[in-house]
Image: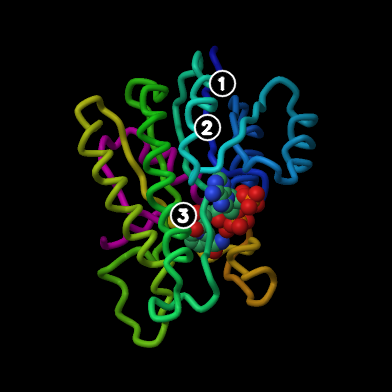
Amino acid sequence: MKKQRILIVGSEKGLGLGLAEAWLRKGWEVFTTHLPNTDVSSLLALAERYPGSLSTGEIDVTDASHIAPLVALLSVRQFDIIFMVAGIYGPLHQSVLQASDAEFQQIMMTNAFGPARLARHLIPMLKPGGTLVFMSSHRGSIASNSEPGIGLELYRASKAALNMLARCIFMDISQKGHTVLSIHPGWVTTAMGTLDGAVEAEIDVKTSVNGMISVIEQHRNDRNHLFIDYANNIWPW
Ligand SMILES: NC(=O)c1ccc[n+]([C@@H]2O[C@H](COP(=O)([O-])OP(=O)(O)OC[C@H]3O[C@@H](n4cnc5c(N)ncnc54)[C@H](OP(=O)(O)O)[C@@H]3O)[C@@H](O)[C@H]2O)c1
């Protein structure tokens, strides 16, 4: 039987790395991407453990000139799942009043526009009925932003924008039987989730990854666009 195949964008550390390892363990063929000029020792170690099953390419999702080379590298492949994981927290202050134009541009480019633009270029590589997954956050839910004093304006805005761009993609590809999932991974112990070790998160990478994989398996043929978390809870937009 032919192996199932997944593309994970942003996976040399954190949740992306955990997802790559978990899908390799499930016997899938995994294609990962990382930023140019970053430390890829984690991916090299994974490739050694799963010979012939892991391939990698480079992309900075904010750089349009990286898209064509990646598409060319992937050209003959068709994917069952494409998962856009890459993202940033942005400046610690998270405040519209304090943010520079460059800070706002960077978080919106990295978390919303970049992944959505790349996804649109990759859609032709999605198998018929294949699933597109965006790493969202419950912080992107407008309806759940009801606690005063939490702030997080920049990050919230970027993930809300990502959710809308994901919906626009779904509306364009739904006729072909595709499913789009905007998934919240939980509050996870990664560099981002702990603000580089400054705070404690709620769950470890393994719990988040196993939860997300089970949710994706359960919903990948729904032919819908869901905002859902790693524990299978639906979130209000
Ligand atoms: N951890 C949480 O609690 C949590 C909660 C909700 C949502 N999320 C989301 O989950 C995703 C993964 O986060 P994480 O917790 O695993 O954080 P992480 O460990 O900081 O990983 C972020 C990944 O994104 C990559 N990346 C950053 N900017 C990029 C760009 N311009 N182009 C391509 N790749 C880029 C990073 O590459 P480098 O390492 O080379 O910079 C890294 O591989 C993010 O979208 C985040 O918003 C996380």
- In the image, farthest residue toward the front: 101
Find out if the beta carbon at label 1 lies less than 8 Å from the nearest ligand 1 atom: no
Start-end of magenta stretch: 209-237
Q: Nearer the viewer, mark 2 or mark 3?
A: 2
Q: Nearer the viewer, residue 43 or 232?
A: 43
Tag 2's secondary structure? strand
User: Residue 173 got which mark?
Assistant: none
Tag 1's secondary structure? helix
Q: Which comes before the other along the chain, label 2 or label 1?
A: 2
- In the image, farthest residue toward the bottom: 149
Q: Residue at x 25, y 31 (%)?
A: 173
Is residue 72 depicted above or below 160 in this figure?
Answer: above
Amino acid marked by disc 1: Leu
Q: Position of residue 29 (x, y in %)?
A: 60, 25
Q: Nearer the viewer, mark 2 or mark 1?
A: 1
Q: Nearer the viewer, mark 3 or mark 1?
A: 1
Is 199 left or right of 178, judged from the image as shown? right
- The residue singled out by tag 2 in the image is 7
Crowdedness near tag 2: few (<14), some (14–19) or many (≥20) residues, C-alpha within 10 Å: many
- The residue singled out by tag 1 in the image is 73
Q: Nearer the viewer, residue 167 or 181?
A: 167
Amino acid marked by disc 3: Tyr
Is 172 left or right of 94, judged from the image as shown? left
Q: CA distance from mark 2 to mark 1?
A: 12 Å
Count of all numbered marks drawn on residues in the image: 3
- The residue singled out by tag 3 in the image is 230
